[in-house]
Amino acid sequence: MRVVFLTDGTPRSIKIGGKASIVFKKTIPKYLSLKGKITTLAIFALKEIGKNQASPAELAKIKAVLSHETKENIRHDAAIAPEWIAEIILKLTENE
């Protein structure tokens, strides 16, 4: 098991037992101000997948999980996300 926490501090990895670890991954402070748990996951998933790399199936899955997020959180977090990610998130959640 690998648990990842975002931090504006020093990145590090702590091993626990044989296979478990806790990773503190450095990020910029604005990403620590994201409100929605679901939009935060969607933003970082899209960042990991890469610009113009998300498959239709991946976008459908992201759209499905974003339906459980509040409109307020989606708008707030889209304003913080990179422009290309904000466009995807807002397009997936329009008409909902």
Image (spheres, rainbow, N blue to C red):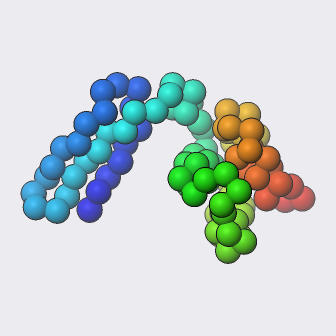
The correct choice, above or below, for 36 with respect to 21 in the image is above
Q: Nearer the viewer, residue 12 or 42?
A: 12
Residue 14 visible in rendering: yes
Q: Name the image quarter holding the C terminus.
A: bottom right
Residue 76 visible in rendering: no
Q: Residue at x 60, y 38 (%)?
A: 35
The correct choice, above or below, for 58 with respect to 74 in the image is below
Quadrant of residue 26 in the image? top left
Q: Name the image quarter holding the N terminus.
A: bottom left
Residue at the left extreme of this rendering: 17
The correct choice, above or below, for 43 with respect to 11 in the image is below
Q: Position of residue 36 (x, y in %)?
A: 61, 44
Quick check: 6 left or right of 84? left
Q: Position of residue 66 (x, y in %)?
A: 68, 58
Quick check: 47 left or right of 92? left
Q: Residue at x 67, y 51 (%)?
A: 51
Q: Position of residue 85 (x, y in %)?
A: 70, 46
Q: Position of residue 10 (x, y in %)?
A: 30, 27
Quadrant of residue 92 in the image? bottom right
Q: Nearer the viewer, residue 57 or 94?
A: 57
Q: Residue at x 18, y 44 (%)?
A: 14
